[in-house]
Image (spheres, rainbow, N blue to C red):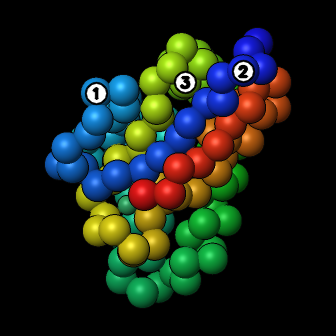
Amino acid sequence: MSEETAILITTARIGDVLPTEFLGLDVTQKSGIKTLAPPWWIIRDYKSGKMPWAEYAGIYHQLMRRSQAEHFDVWDSLVEAGAAGKVLCLQCYCRRGAHCHRHLLAQMIKEYAMAAGYEARIIEE
Ligand SMILES: [Zn+2]
């Protein structure tokens, strides 16, 4: 547990060039860490207009809470990398400014790290 070092979390689009201190994390269902990605069915329903963003966000939140319980090793490894000085950079294909789960996930990782006793901060994209 470190008090002097805050865990930093940010977001980017896949393909963006990242500073070397960034740990780029593809969090997409298509090509990334599946335990942190939204499932295809909510992606499809949101993109087709059947599901409003608030509902998408609510379902994603629930799924990520389950992910924290079932795949805590993944979440803990992010916290460890952040505590070791890497800036956690969550990446998705969505263009900047669009609704994207990467921003929801950043907040959830921040809260997860803080619950584990760390300082954590989000750097805006
Ligand atoms: Zn996205």
Quarter of the rendering containing residue 99? bottom left
Give the residue at mark 2: 4
Of badges 2 and 1, nearer the viewer stands 2
| Secondary structure of residue under mark 3 | helix
Quarter of the image where the C terminus is located: bottom left
| Secondary structure of residue under mark 2 | loop
Amino acid type at mark 3: Gly
Disc ID at residue 117: none
Could you tell me if residue 85 is visible in this image?
yes
Quarter of the image where the N terminus is located: top right
Among numbered discs 2 and 1, the one appearing first in the sequence: 2
Image region (quadrant) for ligand 1: bottom left
Name the foreground residue: 57 vs 11.
Answer: 11
Count of numbered circles on the image: 3
Among numbered discs 3 and 1, the one appearing first in the sequence: 1
Above or below, comparing residue 84 to residue 14 in the picture: above
Q: Residues within 10 Å of mark 2 (few under 14, many from 20)?
A: few
Q: Residues within 10 Å of mark 3 (few under 14, many from 20)?
A: many
Of badges 3 and 1, nearer the viewer stands 1
Give the residue at mark 1: 20
Name the foreground residue: 41 vs 13.
Answer: 13
- Per the model, the C-alpha gap separating discs 2 and 1 is 21 Å
Give the residue at mark 3: 82
| Secondary structure of residue under mark 1 | loop
Judged left or right of residue 73, residue 34 is left
Question: What residue lies at 34% left-to-right and 68% top-to-bottom?
Answer: 96
Could you tell me if residue 45 is visible in this image?
no
